Amino acid sequence: MAGVLDSVNQRTQLVGQNRLELLLFRLRGRQIYGINVFKVKEVLQCPKLSSIPNSRHMVRGVSHIRGETIPIIDLSLAIGLPAIDQDQLANSFVIITEYNRRTQGFLVSGVDRIMNMNWEDILPPPKGAGKDVYLTAVTKIDDKLVEIIDVEKILAEVSPLGEDVGEALVARSAERVPGHLPVLVVDDSSVARRQIQRCLTAIGMEVVTRNDGKQALEYLKDITADGSKARDHLSLIISDVEMPEMDGYTLVTRIKENAALKDMYVMLH
């Protein structure tokens, strides 16, 4: 397992191909879960953990790894499942990830393999699953359902990011000329969409949201069907890179290929 990500740099060079690599793993039972390799730094056998007083219940402890003190989150606990048993820690693995410039480890029971996938095969969670599920997408591999974890939602509960906008920025925004156009925010994570929307709303911007690149492209084509340009309706598009059905890079490619859309400003994050 130590060498499972030896070629991770090569595996993440999928820009513009509407493809991704999923690291497959298990928690408790036979269900398979996935996480995008793009955010994974390392996979290792569970190291020795030191407990932290008054930490959230899903944080099993911290470990000193390659010069960093990293919190280790029990992914089973984080999504509402029973914790990985204490006597099973030595046989478990930790997936070291980086999100929003923060490094953390996710404790899992076992790591399976890496799969090269097309974003078109990655689908949103079933609508009947409810709005509070910890999934950002699902897919099928070898006739088995793979659930892709909404890591942003987990981290927002474990260690929330500050979403307040500074008074100085709000004051400068108040001096803007009235009549600015809305911003289109595209992200498959409801938590990320909400965070961006709150910040933009705080500085007086109107926001339109879509869940993935395919939805966004359909929306852009709808608003320009009368022969107008996208810039007649929107001031900016802020899009996630990793989304089901159509990723951010492919969305930008489709925008630049369309005469009515190609002049739009697009920010990828």
Image (cartoon, helix red, strand yellow):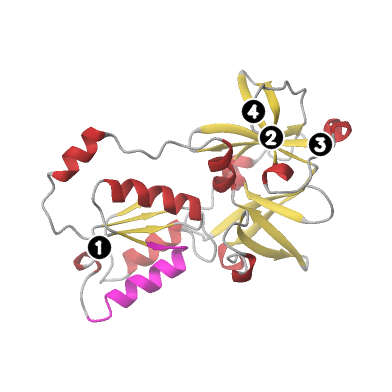
Label 4, on which residue? 55
State the residue at coordinates (72%, 22%). 51
Label 1, on which residue? 234
Label 2, on which residue? 57
- Tag 4 secondary structure: loop
Q: Amino acid at mark 1?
A: Leu
Q: Quadrant of residue 178?
A: bottom left
| Badge 4 vs badge 2, beta-carbon distance below 8 Å | yes
- Sort mark 1 into few (<14), some (14-19) or many (20+) by Cα contacts within 10 Å: many
Q: Position of residue 40 (x, y in %)?
A: 61, 40
Question: Magenta stretch?
Answer: 209-226
Q: Amino acid at mark 2?
A: His
Q: Amino acid at mark 4?
A: Ser
- In primary-sequence order, the first of circles 1 and 2 is 2
Q: Is residue 172 left or right of residue 29?
A: left
* Vertical side of 207 occupied by 161: above or below: above
C-alpha separation, residue under disc 4 versus residue under disc 2: 6 Å
Number of the label disc, if any, that sits on residue 92: 3
State the residue at coordinates (62%, 69%). 126
Quarter of the image containing the N terminus?
Answer: top right
Q: Position of residue 146 (x, y in %)?
A: 71, 60
- Sort mark 3 into few (<14), some (14-19) or many (20+) by Cα contacts within 10 Å: many
